[in-house]
Amino acid sequence: RRRTHVAQNTRHCHQKIRDFVDGVNSHIRMMKLPPGAIVNIDETNVDFDMPSNSTIDRRGVKSVSVRGTGCSQRATVLLGVSMDGEKLPPFIVFTGTRNGRVIREVTGDVGIRGFPTDVVMTVQKKAWVDNEVMLEWIEKVWRPWVASKFFDYSYLIMDCFKVHMQGNILDALASCKTEAEFVVAGYTSKLQVLDVGVNRPFKVYLSDEFNKFVIDNPAKNPSRQHVAMWISHAWKNLKAETILNTWRHVGFNFQ
């Protein structure tokens, strides 16, 4: 799914915010869920070309300019963070078809092809998260992750994106003993942990990776391997403290 910047209602109803947070916290306590079993996910766009507003070049160079690669390709990455500060493996969606060359490149033994091994990748014709891609995320990221934690139940907080709410998605989550919770429409900037305090520092780290690439490769377009590595490095650089502080800032707690 491709994200564009859409202004949200600046006059949020504080009672709606309070009711949602109180409802989530009450459910967490009632189900006696450990913080690691409570997760927020979100999709965010990643362009292969992300020039900054500031100039970049090697130290000592007299003339500098705003740089980019001119590459028009893009990807989507689905990120997830738990209430105890853990990060789920990034799930990267590149442009491609299910029986094409790119799907063979980004699946299987990807390490020998120069991809990081701490991300999971797939393709979609427009690099969006559709129903099929969401089911793939559940099977390749979510199901193994919750199984490794031995949780009795898990609690997944998402926005009201149509794909998240489809019946077969909810059934697949239920088969993982996961209950889905949907953030009040129009309130993700106040209630969704990734939107509130995680996506922005992640994008800053991602931009840093891009800038390093442009300086070292002034006449080269980035490959899928490069973009996957940027995402891997940026996600590693994101501190658990940032995640924990954002959950607390929104008002979520398990006590």
Image (cartoon, rainbow, N blue to C red):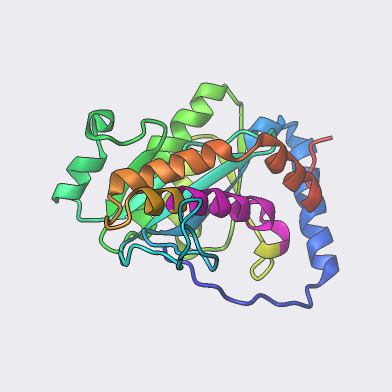
Quarter that holds the C terminus: top right
Q: Is residue 181 above or below residue 161?
A: above
Q: Residue furthest left?
A: 100
Instruction: Give the main secondary structure of the magenta stretch.
Output: helix
- Answer whether residue 173 is magenta in the image: no
Residue 239 point in image, percent of width and height: 65, 37
Identify the residue at image location x=45%, y=64%. 51
Horizontal arrangement in the rendering, residue 136 relative to residue 84 (left or right)? left
Q: Could you tell me if residue 235 is visible in this image?
A: yes
Residue 209 magenta: yes
Q: Nearer the viewer, residue 84 or 66?
A: 66
Q: Is residue 214 left or right of residue 44?
A: left
Q: Position of residue 219 (x, y in %)?
A: 27, 58
Residue 45: image location, x then y, percent:
45, 60
Numbered label tally: 0
Q: Residue at x 56, y 23 (%)?
A: 149
The quarter in which the N terminus is drawn is bottom left
In magenta, the rendered stretch is 190-210
Q: Quadrant of residue 242?
A: top right
Residue nearest the viewer, comparing 79 with 150: 79
Q: Position of residue 49 (x, y in %)?
A: 38, 62
In this rendering, the answer to whether 20 lies above or below 246 is below
Residue 251 visible to an observer of this rendering: no
Task: Tell me which residue sits at (59%, 53%) in the image.
Answer: 199
Q: Is 122 above or below relative to 145?
A: below
Of residues 25 and 141, the one nearer the viewer is 141
